[in-house]
Amino acid sequence: MPRLGWQGEVRRPSLEGGTMIYTLISPLDMHIHFREGAMLRAVAPLSARDFAGGVIMPNLVPPVDNLDRLVRYRAEIDTAIGGMGFTPYMTLFFRAYSEAELRAARPHIIGVKLYPAGVTTNSEAGVQSIRDAEPTLALMEDLGIPLLVHGETGGFVLDREREFLPIYAHLARRFPRLTIVMEHITTREAVALLDDSPNLYATITLHHLQITLDDVAGGLLQPHLFCKPIAKRPEDRAALLQAALTPHPKVMFGSDSAPHPVHAKEAAACAAGVFSAPVALPLLAEIFAQHDALDRLQTFVSDNAQRIYGVTPPFKRVVLRRESWCVPQRYGEVTPYYAGRTIEWRVVRDSGEQGQEGARADANAPN
């Protein structure tokens, strides 16, 4: 893929006491699963510590598919992360909405998330037919509400995203004023589609920048790397990495951090999801530094998302230092991505702006 221009602010690494540091301004995670109850209280501060905001997924049980449910869920999130300088950008679960419902919800949401029925966790109430969804999509286009999509079919697991790409192309043509975000893309064909459709955008996860299907199932099965969409081939990973490092002006970071308790992951019916929230920024810094692209990380993790969605997150200065640390085996009941492994970068705190945030997140660290 040719190197594309980008409009974000150039933020270059510097040295402090002989150690390389890099400062991000208001990083954003544009795809997070917070869950509810005790799990939310455990994991949400880990994202709020490092990010200024994030797009919260609505596939709960029952789904977040009405304004009352959304307002209650937002209040629960605010209680869990209060005072941490983090904006939860809320989404509704796609269903047939009336114009009145969407108008009432518009001030409270960043978009509506479409799940094809049964393709991922808690998506049984998802869309059965794209054609049946079009009246609601037309309303969203008129009201300027973005559409976020988990783009997979029910076909063979490695082909599910590729099979969905013609649907993306159809929607982009059918609703040219509708902002459509292809969530957590995993294939080189999806990257290429960005250049063919002006109103298509995409999020890319941390783990899809690093792993392939061989890491998941090439030897002993690695349940904590199992996710949907599943990791693909090395050439797909290479295309995603190029898009992120450039960075392509239509891609944003979205972790798809999806916590499950250990008993749900290390089980015969393994739940899909990679819990990457505690390590997202350090590992992204490591990846970008390895490719001599650290000065572009700001654009990938914040600037593009602000421009695409038209949001202004709270100001938050996040300092990354090249300083190795070992990832804990557990955060509460959840095994994180990179558990037990060493990362060469870490987020550092100070006694000022970050102090309260660090203290809140440390309370959720493993015992």
Image (cartoon, rainbow, N blue to C red):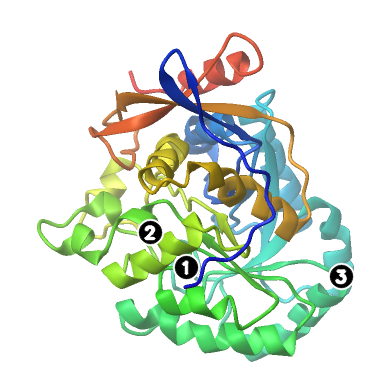
Q: CA distance from mark 3 to mark 1?
A: 26 Å
Q: Are marks 2 and 1 in contact (CB under 8 Å)?
A: yes
Q: Residue tagged by mark 3? A: 143
Q: Which residue is mark 1?
A: 185
Question: Which residue is pictured at 44% across the width and 86% down the height?
Answer: 163
The extreme top residue here reads 351
- The quarter of the rendered structure image containing the C terminus is top left
Residue type at tag 3: Leu
Mark 3 vs mark 1: in front: 1
Q: Is residue 356 left or right of residue 212?
A: right
* Spot occupied by residue 14 in the image (x, y as percentages of width and height): 51, 27
Residue, x 64% and y 37% (percent of image)? 77
332 or 251: nearer the viewer: 251
Q: Position of residue 227 (x, y in %)?
A: 35, 60
Quarter-wise, where is residue 72 in the image?
top right
Residue 208 numbered tag: 2
Type of amino acid at the residue the image marks with label 2: His
- Count neighbours of disc 1 (C-alpha within 10 A) and say few if under 14, some if 14 to 19, many if 20 or more: many
Q: CA distance from mark 2 to mark 1?
A: 8 Å
Q: Who's the residue at 49% across and 63% down the image? A: 243
Q: Residue 84's spot in the image, x, y percent?
A: 65, 25
Q: Can I make out residue 359 in this image?
A: yes
